[in-house]
């Protein structure tokens, strides 16, 4: 048994029973070991959850970085969509990710920010847009994975179309991008 095996089995357990039911006791049983042997690889459950979150984000973390010739607007949309798709790959993926710190991803985040700034997006606006898009995505996926029936609450309102999760996500993402484009254009006109 190694660290990677423990994380893989923990993620499989997550998919089967959900985040609330993932425990070191259950994981140890699944691996056929005594619970204390897990502490050799992870000192606390929090450490295990952090490793699970990092592993669960691999599809997004391994996505190609933007190239200098990419259109920043299209890249921004696709980067956010990739994040959403990755969160949706795992049961309770958004809950697992929420509050985690992207320890191994800092260089990639810097490179994404550099791409936006080099493309003409003011640094502060790029930072805020990436933060807003990330938090918006986690919140959207939390709602989607919880399937709270939020659309049912809108039923009584006149002229409010019923939206599926993806359509609603895309509408909000378009609003974030629109705001970023407007602020970028305003900054460019002030500079000239």
Image (cartoon, rainbow, N blue to C red):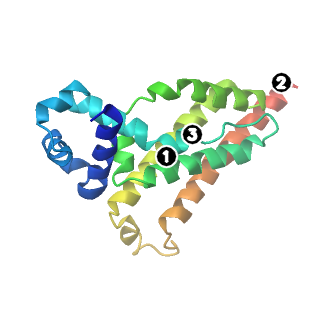
Observer-nearest of 15 and 183: 15
Q: Nearer the viewer, residue 90 or 34?
A: 34
The outermost residue toward the front is 1
Q: Mark 1 or mark 2, which is nearer the start of the sequence?
A: 1
Could you give the CA–CA distance between mark 3 and mark 1, rounded to whole angstroms? Answer: 21 Å
Residue drawn at the location 53% of the way across and 63% of the way down: 166
Tag 3 residue: 62
Look at 28% across and 38% down and name the residue there.
6
Inter-mark Cα distance, 2 to 1: 30 Å
Per the model, the C-alpha gap separating discs 3 and 2 is 36 Å
Q: Nearer the viewer, mark 3 or mark 2?
A: 3
Pointer 3: residues within 10 angstroms few (<14), some, or many (20+)? few
Answer left or right for 144 relative to 136.
Answer: left
Q: Residues within 10 Å of mark 1 (few under 14, many from 20)?
A: some
Q: Which residue is mark 2?
A: 191
Mark 1 lies on residue: 136
The label shown at residue 176 is: none
For marks 3 and 2 on the same chain, the one whose residue lies earlier in the sequence: 3
């Amino acid at each position: 048994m190694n660290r990677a095996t423990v994380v893989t089995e923990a993620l499989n357990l997550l998919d089967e029973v959900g985040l609330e039911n993932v425990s070191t006791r259950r994981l140890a049983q699944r691996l056929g070991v005594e619970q204390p042997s897990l502490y050799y690889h992870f000192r606390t459950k929090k450490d295990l959850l952090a490793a699970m979150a990092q592993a669960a984000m691999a599809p997004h973390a391994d996505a190609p970085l933007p190239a200098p010739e990419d259109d920043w607007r299209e890249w921004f949309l696709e980067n956010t969509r990739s994040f959403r798709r990755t969160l949706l790959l795992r049961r309770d993926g958004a809950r697992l990710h929420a509050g985690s710190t992207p320890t191994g991803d800092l260089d990639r985040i810097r490179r994404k920010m550099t791409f936006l700034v080099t493309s003409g997006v003011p640094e502060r606006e790029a930072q805020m847009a990436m933060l807003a898009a990330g938090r918006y995505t986690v919140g959207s996926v939390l709602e989607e994975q919880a399937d709270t029936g939020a659309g049912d609450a809108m039923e009584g309102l006149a002229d409010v179309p019923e939206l599926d999760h993806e359509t609603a996500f895309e509408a909000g993402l378009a609003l974030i991008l629109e705001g970023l484009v407007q602020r970028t254009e305003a900054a460019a006109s002030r500079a000239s």
